[in-house]
Image: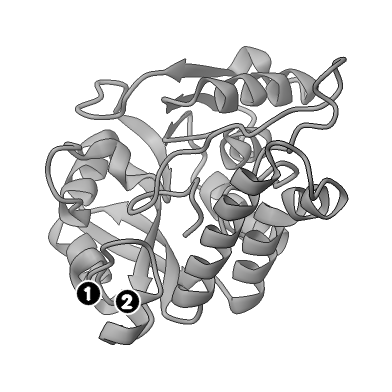
């Protein structure tokens, strides 16, 4: 996925800002203007939120929440619920707090800047983990979705719901396809969809809903992720930061075109087995 998405890529970095004197011509942040930090359409988000809210949660925990857009929507749809979002990106959390205040949800949600590894913030009625499974894994060990699913099972209350967004291979990539992706891409970086669902069942869940991001959702996300920076580069080709910014954007776009139609995203709505 993008350079700001979950493993195997790195965390988001602000490349610039605008509005104050002396900074208006700096490159914007990659991903600025995105509603969701992932290939998730408004239509799908609405359906997911409605299903989660129908279970009448009283507590919602968002692991690796970023600015917590989906968290806020679940809270809005479930008036009796309180929310907690945890992430290590302070800028994203600050944005989440502003969005919560604008929507009248500031009293019902708390954003905490901390690691999700071994978190004691649960259990909760609803647990969200969208492209952030690495937050629940030891960073010194290989990423393992089985570990993530066991942690999610620990963090959800009986009768609750987990929404797990995770990458999977649409088909087993060839060596040539892997060479076009992120550095060091390997076949065992991801499972197939059926393998991922099997892991969820082994972890103690029933897969109540299985859905995957469409090509249109991917394109909307990936192009939207770069859009503001690409427009800035066209207007500032000789800016002192242009070469560095151009190289980063070109690298990210090339990686996406390498895994396009090979890497998918599954959204699994999981119910813990009693």
Report the Cα–Cα distance between label 2 and label 1.
8 Å
Foreground residue among 31 and 94: 31
Q: Does 120 sit above or below residue 252?
A: above
Q: Which SS class for mark 1?
A: helix
Packing grade of label 2 (10 A; few <14, some 14-19, many >=20) is some
Residue at horizontal 18%, vertical 69%?
A: 188
Rendered image coloring scheme: one colour
Foreground residue among 150 and 47: 150
Q: Please name the residue that numbered disc 2 is placed on.
A: 178
Which numbered disc covers residue 187?
A: 1
Report the mark closest to the observer, 2 or 1.
2
Residue 159, percent from left and from top? 33, 45
Contact, CB < 8 Å: mark 2 with mark 1? yes
140 with respect to 262 (left or right): left
98 with respect to 222 (left or right): right
Residue at horizontal 32%, vertical 61%?
A: 183
Q: Quadrant of residue 91?
A: top right
Q: Quadrant of residue 119?
A: top left
Residue 17, percent from left and from top? 74, 28
Residue at horizontal 71%, vertical 20%?
A: 98
3 with respect to 250 (left or right): left
Of callouts 2 and 1, the N-terminal one: 2
Kindly tell me whether residue 158 is visible in this rendering.
no
Q: Does 70 sit above or below residue 224?
A: above
Foreground residue among 136 and 79: 136
Kindly tell me whether residue 99 is visible in this rendering.
yes
228 with respect to 263 (left or right): right
Q: Quadrant of residue 48?
A: bottom right
Residue at horizontal 37%, vertical 59%?
A: 166
Residue 78, percent from left and from top? 61, 36
């Amino acid at each position: 996925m993008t350079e700001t998405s979950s493993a195997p890529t790195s965390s988001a970095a602000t490349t610039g800002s605008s509005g104050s004197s002396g900074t208006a011509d700096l490159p914007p942040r990659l991903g600025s203007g995105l509603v969701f930090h992932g290939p998730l359409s408004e239509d799908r988000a609405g359906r997911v939120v409605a299903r989660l809210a129908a279970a009448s949660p009283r507590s919602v925990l968002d692991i690796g929440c970023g600015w917590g857009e989906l968290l806020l929507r679940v809270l809005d749809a479930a008036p009796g619920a309180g929310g907690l979002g945890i992430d290590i990106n302070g800028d994203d959390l600050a944005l989440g707090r502003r969005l919560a205040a604008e929507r009248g949800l500031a009293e019902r949600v708390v954003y905490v800047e901390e690691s999700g590894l071994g978190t004691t913030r649960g259990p909760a009625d609803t647990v969200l983990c969208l492209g952030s499974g690495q937050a629940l894994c030891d960073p010194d060990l290989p990423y393992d979705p089985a570990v993530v699913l066991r942690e999610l099972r620990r963090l959800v209350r009986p009768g609750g719901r987990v929404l797990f967004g995770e990458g999977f291979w649409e088909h087993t990539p060839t060596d040539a396809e892997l060479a076009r992706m992120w550095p060091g891409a390997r076949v065992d970086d991801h499972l197939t969809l059926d393998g991922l669902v099997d892991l969820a069942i082994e972890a103690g869940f029933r897969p109540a809903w299985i859905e995957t991001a469409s090509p249109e959702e991917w394109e909307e996300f990936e192009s939207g992720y770069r859009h503001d920076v690409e427009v800035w580069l066209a207007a500032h080709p000789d800016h002192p930061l242009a070469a560095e910014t151009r190289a980063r954007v070109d690298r990210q776009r090339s990686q996406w075109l390498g895994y396009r139609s090979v890497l998918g995203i599954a959204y699994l709505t999981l119910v813990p087995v009693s």
